[in-house]
Image (cartoon, rainbow, N blue to C red):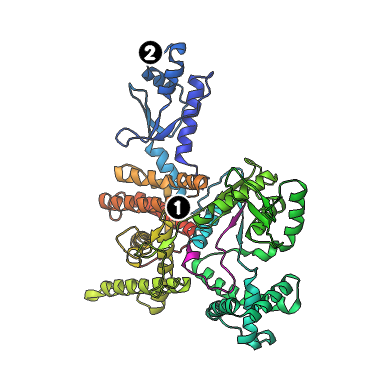
Amino acid sequence: MPMMRPVHAEAKAIFSQALRTAFPSICQEPLVVKGNPKFGDYQCNNAMGLFKDHGKVLGFANPGAIAEAIKKGMPSNSMFSEVIVSPQGFVTVKISEAWLADQVRGLASGAEIQFVDAPVKRVTVDFSSPNIAKEMHVGHLRSSILGETLCRILEFCGHEVHRLNHVGDWGTQFGMLIEYMKEAHPGFMQGGEMPNVTDLNAFYKAAKKRFDDDEDFKGRSQRAVVDLQAGGVMARQAWQKICDVSRKSFCEIYERLGVRAEERGESFYNEMIPPLVDELKARGLCVESKGAMCIFTPRVSQIPLMVVKGDGGFGYDSTDMAAIYHRLFVMRSDWIVYLTDLGQETHFHMVFDAAEQAGWHRPPATRVDHMGFGVVQGEDKKRFKTRSGETVKLVDLLDEAVSRAREEITARVAEQGKDGGSAQLADEQEQTAAAEKLGIAAIRYFDMKQNRTSNYVFNYDKMLDPKGNSAVYLFYAYARIRAIQRKSGVDPSKLNIAELKIAEPAERELALKLLQFPDVIEAILQDLHLHRLCEYLWELCGTLTTFYNQCKVLGGAEESSRLVICEATRAVLAKSFFLLGFEPLERI
């Protein structure tokens, strides 16, 4: 199909030409907004400002007269069927049903839905970032799924996307962990069985306790860190084994969530830090302060970035400066997005400011964003914990959602089988696979429908509510379209899209809503608020329900036309589901 363009942008382009024609000597940005549905679809509000600033000079008596000039300057086009001017100066337009039908036919044509955000950029997205030797927990949920969806949207828009997983794979904690594992699991270095990640969690806590309580153990741990940083063979092998077993656990979670990312942890940047610090010193950007080497960012914070600690070591500030240097200067990224909780917002803005001082970040040629998010809470409005007060493991969260989804599917199958009815998912294996898809989608959608900057209360019941704003509701909407298509006996790929006619108000509303899809994508690119896509899907499914209630699809003279708009809706739902990271069910 032809490239989709935002409807708002199309309307704005026509008004822009009208303003240039009517007032060639005045440079005006068209002020186009959605109109009151009673009067039209879009509204241009330039006339009032033009009259205030230039009315007398141009010889216009009132804003209405200027609005008439804008209308007269409008180029010939197939998009608008009606242009209405109000005495107050509003120019309201109604989109042509023929134009709507033509655009919707493209969506139903079977061709891939396409959208391009020009110019194409090289974008690096830093997300997920769990710590090696610890299990992923609920705190990693938001970064992982928000980051994956952002990457999918950017790729859909034509950008070259680099997905980086900045894992915590370096630091003093590895010394104590290596030493403790030598004691508790002495065979692991000789090819013996490695402890699983749950064991590593326990080892981590036990190692920390030994480190705090036992001076001899503490000393050995510190020597192990020195050996690791110096490239000691034994220490590096032990470190690599710890990373490998953690990586295996992470990959299992990522596969279930549909997340892909290249692991590039803190250790990747180690060797870059010393020469980078030397360069920043030579340029006078890195200065001594209370024994440490610091970069000051007064536009962001009075607390400096500490690129070399007082003891001569390197910390998070050092690594993050090396990382942004590598991404901007070596990878030549045009745009970098960091996804972490909002608690780290100031830190990253300090890093961005320091990178700008160093000349690596050159706005507007380059763009850097911190895509911060709130925390997942329990019913007590505190961080989501288990009853024993432990952090909720991410694998347990996913398992519980899938288990509850299976209960929903089982209940649905039982209901469908009553009175001799036929269940859509009668096979046990189908039910198990459907539960996995539905449970994971429920978690993803429930998280992403929230404004990312807000905290939210995690609730399984709301997440799986088939009548509320949930993935379950969206899946039912998709499955209903598929059921209609099966019942019609017409292969969607063989529909005669030329038969589509937009006549009834509910058809028109559904067509308009479908064509707003690229407007939603464009808005997300501006502010990185992914909940816009979830809100759009909720509204689209509500508009689809109204369409069903007011327009009979099967068995009428309009069947062929309405099957086309159903297929167009299915295509937009399917693309949106993919961007959000889940796969719909054909039957439910």
Residue at x 60% of width, y 73% of height:
247
Q: In this image, 102 relative to 40: left or right?
A: right
Residue at x 35% of width, y 59% of height:
477
Specify the amino acid type for callout 1: Thr
Q: In this image, 421 relative to 343: left or right?
A: left
Q: Where is 163 relative to 368, above or below?
A: below
Which residue is label 1 attached to?
A: 453
Q: CA distance from mark 2 to mark 1?
A: 48 Å
Q: Which residues are magenta?
A: 122-141
Q: Secondary structure beneath disc 1? A: loop
Which residue is label 2 attached to?
A: 61
Quarter of the figure that contains the C terminus: bottom left
Q: Earlier in the sequence, mark 2 or mark 1?
A: 2
Q: Position of residue 509 (x, y in %)?
A: 34, 44
Q: Position of residue 189 (x, y in %)?
A: 68, 84
Specify the amino acid type for callout 2: Ala
- Residue 49 vs residue 241, the one in the foreground: 241
Q: Position of residue 505 (x, y in %)?
A: 30, 42
Mark 2, mark 1: which one is toward the viewer?
A: 1
Residue 495, visible in the rendered structure:
no
Residue at x 45% of width, y 49% of height:
107
